[in-house]
């Protein structure tokens, strides 16, 4: 009888545990992601970069010291760093096939560091693949098509970054613990859409930030 009681107790505990995990997943909250991901304390220089980025939210043209900067994701990111004496285009490839994102990526290879998290610094860069059909061949084969600047990382691991995606500079969200989830049941956004859905998109096309994520990069070391 005692053996049967122990088995019954274990079964109840197991069922309760499974129910708890299912509930957490339904709410879009992972217990382990809450513990592993925190925004680290930013240095004054990193804080200044983030402040510049937030000041551009809603902007539709970008000028730095009277110099008009290309109004796309790479141009906006470059302009923010230019305000702090760093040209992310310096040392990048000069071939006609190199878009701004790839130029910035090449700059980081020389003067920064790449990483995958989970610790993310304010002011870090975040790169994405396949946010649009860059080579216009109808396939999902376009690396390094988007870049943004990390503003913060929330306690559930959601990274808030600033970038120009559509009509203006805005805040966007990405949660790598739940890359395929747009919203939780209570309406919180975990991953924004970074790619527009097209009628001729291939079956393997991804659209959410967490699905399209490539890597983070630190240009201003802590």
Image (cartoon, grey):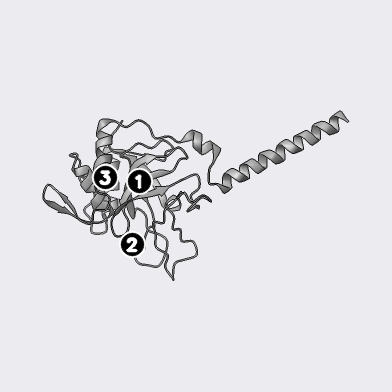
* Cα–Cα gap, marks 1 and 3: 9 Å
Mark 2, secondary structure of its residue: loop
The mark nearer the N terminus, 2 or 3, is: 3
* Cα–Cα gap, marks 1 and 2: 22 Å
Tell me the quarter of the image containing the N terminus.
Answer: top right
Tell me the quarter of the image containing the C terminus.
Answer: top left
Give percent across and percent down for residue 166: 32, 59
The mark nearer the N terminus, 1 or 2, is: 2
Q: Residue at x 83, y 32 (%)?
A: 5
Left or right of residue 4, residue 110 in this image:
left
Say which residue label 2 marks.
134
Q: Residue at x 42, y 52 (%)?
A: 209
Q: Residue at x 74, y 38 (%)?
A: 12
Say which residue label 3 marks.
53
Give percent across and percent down for residue 22: 62, 45
Above or below 77: residue 41: above
Give percent across and percent down for residue 218: 32, 38
Answer whether labels 1 and 2 touch (C-beta < 8 Å): no
């Amino acid at each position: 009888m005692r053996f049967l009681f122990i088995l019954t107790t274990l079964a109840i505990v197991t069922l309760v545990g499974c129910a708890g995990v299912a509930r957490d997943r339904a709410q879009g909250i992972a217990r382990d992601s809450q513990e592993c991901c925190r925004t680290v304390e930013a240095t004054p220089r990193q804080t200044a970069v983030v402040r510049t980025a937030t000041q551009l939210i809603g902007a539709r043209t970008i000028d730095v010291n009277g110099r008009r900067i290309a109004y796309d994701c790479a141009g906006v990111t470059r302009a923010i760093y230019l305000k702090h004496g760093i040209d992310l285009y310096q040392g990048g490839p000069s071939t006609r096939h190199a878009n701004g994102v790839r130029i910035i990526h090449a700059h980081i290879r020389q003067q920064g560091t790449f990483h995958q998290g989970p610790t993310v610094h304010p002011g870090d860069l975040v790169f994405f693949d396949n946010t649009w059909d860059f080579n216009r061949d109808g396939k999902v084969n376009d690396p390094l098509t988007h870049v943004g600047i990390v503003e913060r990382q929330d306690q559930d691991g959601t990274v808030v970054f600033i970038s120009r995606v559509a009509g203006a500079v805005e805040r966007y969200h990405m949660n790598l613990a739940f890359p395929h989830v747009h919203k939780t049941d209570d309406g919180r956004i975990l991953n924004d859409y970074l790619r527009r859905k097209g009628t001729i998109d291939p079956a393997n096309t991804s659209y959410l930030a967490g699905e399209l994520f490539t890597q983070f990069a630190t240009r201003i070391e802590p």
